[in-house]
Amino acid sequence: MSKQRNRREALVYHAKPQPGKIKVVPTKPYATQRDLALAYSPGVAQPCLEIEKDKNNAYKYTAKGNLVAVISNGTAVLGLGNIGPEASKPVMEGKGLLFKIFADIDVFDIEVDTENVDEFIQTVKNIAPTFGGINLEDIKAPEAFEIEKRLKEELDIPVMHDDQHGTAIISAAALLNALELTHKKIEEVNIVVNGAGAAAVSCTRLYKSFGAKDENIVMVDSKGVIRKDRENLTKEKLEFATDRKIDTLEEAMQNADVFVGLSIADVVTPEMLLTMAKKPIVFAMANPNPEIQYQLAIDTREDIIMATGRSDHPNQVNNVLGFPFIFRGALDVRATAINEAMKMAAVKSLAALAKEPVPEQVNIAYGKTKLTFGTDYIIPKPFDPRLIATVPIAVAKAAIESGVAQEPIKDWQAYEDELLQRLGNDNKVVRLLHDRAKVNPKKIVFAEAEHIDVLKAAQIVHEEGIAEPILLGDEATILELKKQLEFDAEVQIVNPKIEASLEKRKQYAFKYWENRQRSGVTLYQSETKMRERNYYAAMMVSEGDADGMISGYSRAYPTVVKPVFEVIGKDTNVKKVATVNIMITDRGPLFLADTSLNIDPSAIEMAETAQMTAKLAETFGFAPVVAMLSYANFGSSVHPNAAKVRDAVKLLHKANPELIVDGEIQMDFALNKELREQKFSFSKLAGKNVNTLVFPNLESANITYKLLKELHKADSIGPIMMGLRKPVHILQLGASVDEMVNMTAVAVIDAQEREKE
C-alpha cells in the first residue's frame, strides 16, 4: 500500500460518513411529550433532588457508573511524541471505541490544554464528578507519575494511567507463565529492562510485587545501564539503579534470564541473545518494530520464549487484554480506586486463562488446530470471548477483599451472566473472519473487476492479506482503474474474450460441454458461454485455477446463479443449495436462512437447510441454537404452512438429536428467552440464546434480513452459498465494498475448510 493512499484512507475513515469514531446515543424513550417531560423538565427534578440528598445516587439515576473519561494532554502520543491536545483526540476517541467494543463501557474523551502538572490535576479533579473512572493516556514521563499518584490520592473513583499499567499487567501475566514453562522462579531470575519510561517503571514495579528482587534487576535507558553512581537520576530511575559495574545493554544481557524491551527497534542483536541464560524469556515490545525481530530471535535461540507487541506473531502483549476488563470490574463494584491487589488479580486471571482449554471460536479465528498452553501461547488472545467474564470478576473480587468496593456483588453467577450479555455489543465476527482468512489466503477470482468498487474490494483483500485476487475483465480498463486507486501491486488479470485466453477458453468449453452435452448443450454453445465472465470464472474454480469466486455486484442474482449452478453444481448428497446471511446485531451474530434461493422449501428441504446453517455456524466458531420459524407456536395451527415446519423439526430431532433445534415457533418467542421460558419451558430451546433462524419461505427470510439491514443498520455478511461443490459466493446487487471484502473472507474460509477435507 502506498503511503499516500494509506494516508488518504485513514483520513477518509476518520472523516466519513461523520467525523470522529464515537457518539452519544439516548438510552431512554423520547418519542412522546411525556417521555421528554420525564427526560428533562419537570421530571428531571426528582432524580436531582435524590442525588442532592446523597451524591451516590448519581450511580442510580445517571450514566456515571458506566462512564469513563479518557484524558490526555497529548504530550506522549503513540510513537508521535508531544503533538498537543487537539492532535491527540483521534487516539483518545480510538481508546473510547475499544472500551465500548470490548467491555461495553461508555467514554467521553477529554483533551486538556496544559503541560503544567498542577493545572492538569486540578482540571481532572474539577470534572471528576461526571465519571465513574478516569483513564489517563499518553502523558509524558516523569509528569505522568506525579499526575497519577496525586489523582489516586485525591479522587474517590478509579484512576489508571494505562500506558504504565496496561503493559505491566499483560506482560506480568505472560512472565508468570513463561517462568512456569522454563521451571524458573521469579525470585531468582536476572531481569534486564530496556527503557525507563512510564511503562518500563510500572512493569518493573509489578514484577517486584510478584517477587522479583532488586538485586536481580538491571534497567537500561538511552545513556546505558542506570547505575547508582550516575548523576541527575529521577527518583523513578534511582529506584531501579544497580550497584553492578556494567555500562551497556550488551553487558547487562550476559546470563540474563529475562529481557523486557520497552524502547526502540533492533537494539538487541543475535550475539546478545546467545549470551543469555538457558531458556531465555524475551519480551521485545517496542512498536511497531520490536527490539529484535521475532524470526531472527527464534532462529538464534531454539530454547527462547518470545513475546512482542505485534499481532502477527505468537504471544502478543496487547493492552486491550487489560484496561477494558479492569475498568469493567472496578465500575461494577463502584471501586474508589484501582489498587495493587486489583492489578495483581488481573495478572493472575490472565495467566490462569491461558492454561485453560481454548474455545473453538478462538482456534478458528487464529487458524489453529488447537491452541494450548506452551511457548507459543502464554497469554490469551485479544478476541477470546472468555475475557469479559474472567478478568472483571477477578478484579471485582479483589476490590471487595481489599476494601475499596462500595457496592459488593452478592450473586456472582448473575454477574457472570450479565458480563456475557455484554459480548453482543461488538462486531467481533468480522474481525474473526478476516483474521482467519489471513492465516491461509486463497486465490479468489473477481468476475466483475471492471467496476471500481469491486476493484477497491480486491485491493483491500490483497493489501490486508485476506486473499490473492484474480481480476476478470478488460486489462486496459482495469489498469486505468488501478491507477486511480493507487493499486500498484501486481495481480493476475484475465480477459476471457481475447486471443491470449483462447487455449484456456477452449479447454474450459470442452470440459463444460462434456458435463452438459446430455442437457442439450452443444460444443459451439459451450465456447460461446466461456466468453462470459461468470461462466469463465466458475470454470476457473471448477478446474482448480482459482480457489473461489465472487460475483453478483452488477447483475441480478438469478443471472449469476444460473452459470454457477451449471458449472459448479451441488455437492454430494445435497438436495438443494441454500443461502444464509449473518446479521451482526447488538445481541450478537444471527444466522438467517434461506435468504436468497428457495421460494417455498419442503419440510425435508427446510431440515437440510437447518443442518447446513448449523454447520456453517460451527465453522465460524459458534454453537448453533436453531429456531425453526413460523407464524404459529408448537402445534397451535393445523395449516399446512405450520405443519411443514413442524415436520422439519421432527426430521431434525430424529436425524440430529444432538442439535439444539426446535419449532415451529414465532419470531418474538425465538428471540426472547424470558418469554419463551414462561410459555414453552418444555422446548429444547429453553434457557438458550437462539442464534440461528430458519425461515419457512424465501419471502419471510429475504424481507427480514433486508429490514434488519436497512432499518436497524445491522451489518450483513452474505448471502453465503451452502451446498455447492466448490466455494462460490454471489453478492446482492450493488453490494458495498465492505460487504464484498467480508464475502471474500468467507470464500477464503470456505476454501480452507474444503482443503482440510
Image (cartoon, rainbow, N blue to C red):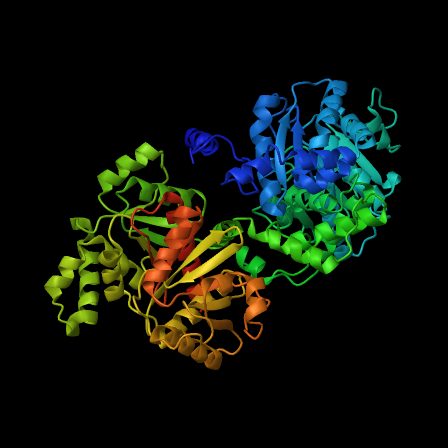
Q: Is residue 248 visible?
A: no
State left or right for residue 637 relative to residue 230.
left
Q: At 80% from the left edge and 32% from the top edge, which residue is drawn?
A: 152
Is 521 situated above or below 454?
Answer: below
Q: At 32% from the left edge and 52% from the top edge, which residue is drawn?
A: 732
- Where is residue 181 drawn, in percent x and y? 75, 57
- Where is residue 529 drawn, in percent x and y? 16, 59
- Name the quadrant containing residue 284: top right
Is 82 situated above or below 356?
Answer: above
Say which of 613 and 724 sits in front.
613
- Where is residue 675 drawn, in percent x and y? 56, 64
Say which of 548 and 350 sits in front.
350
- How many numbered markers are drawn? 0
Q: Is residue 424 visible?
A: yes
Q: Which of the image's four quarters has the N terminus?
A: top left
Q: Residue reaching furthest bottom?
A: 654
- Name the quadrant containing residue 245: top right
Q: At 21% from the left edge and 71% from the top edge, which residue is drawn?
A: 515
Is 268 situated above or below 535?
Answer: above
